[in-house]
Image (cartoon, helix red, strand yellow):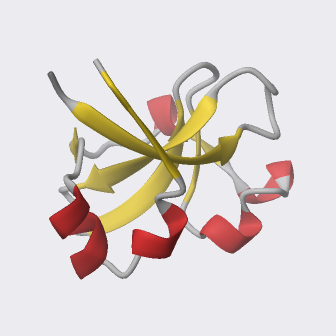
Amino acid sequence: MEKYYWYSQCVNCNQGRLILTEDTTNKRMYLHCEECERGWLNPQEAHDNSKGFLALEEDFETDNPNIETITIYGWKSIAMHSFSE
């Protein structure tokens, strides 16, 4: 079972969770909506739909980070919630 960490509900679709996702190509974290596929590079801007991007239009590889990786990137305080699948 894999554990996912998420920040808040998506402001774009109001249905999905903003999941902490590692962009392994560019060595960075971003918030990724599980429903509408929007992303935000800065959690402080996740409330502003105009600051997001459509992740499907970007060319990078991703991974589901564990809490240790999230901590290394300095996003531990953003990992407000979690769920397992």
x 19%, y 66%: residue: 69
x 52%, y 25%: residue: 34
Residue 63 in the image: above or below residue 30: above
Residue 26 visible in the picture: no
Image quadrant assignment for residue 11? top right
Q: Nearer the viewer, residue 77 or 21?
A: 77
Name the spot of residue 30 as percent of width and height, x first.
Answer: 46, 57
- Image check: 72 left or right of 48? left
Q: How many numbered marks have been drawn onto this rendered protein structure?
A: 0
Looking at the figure, which quarter contains the C terminus? top left
- Image check: 78 left or right of 46? left
Name the spot of residue 68 as percent of width and height, x first.
Answer: 17, 67
Name the spot of residue 36 as percent of width and height, x first.
Answer: 64, 22
Looking at the figure, which quarter contains the N terminus? top left
Residue 83 in the image: above or below residue 71: above
x 62%, y 66%: residue: 43
Residue 76 visible in the picture: yes
x 65%, y 25%: residue: 16
Image quadrant assignment for residue 46? bottom right
Name the spot of residue 29 as percent of width and height, x first.
Answer: 37, 63
Residue 71 in the image: above or below residue 11: below
Q: Nearer the viewer, residue 8 or 38?
A: 8
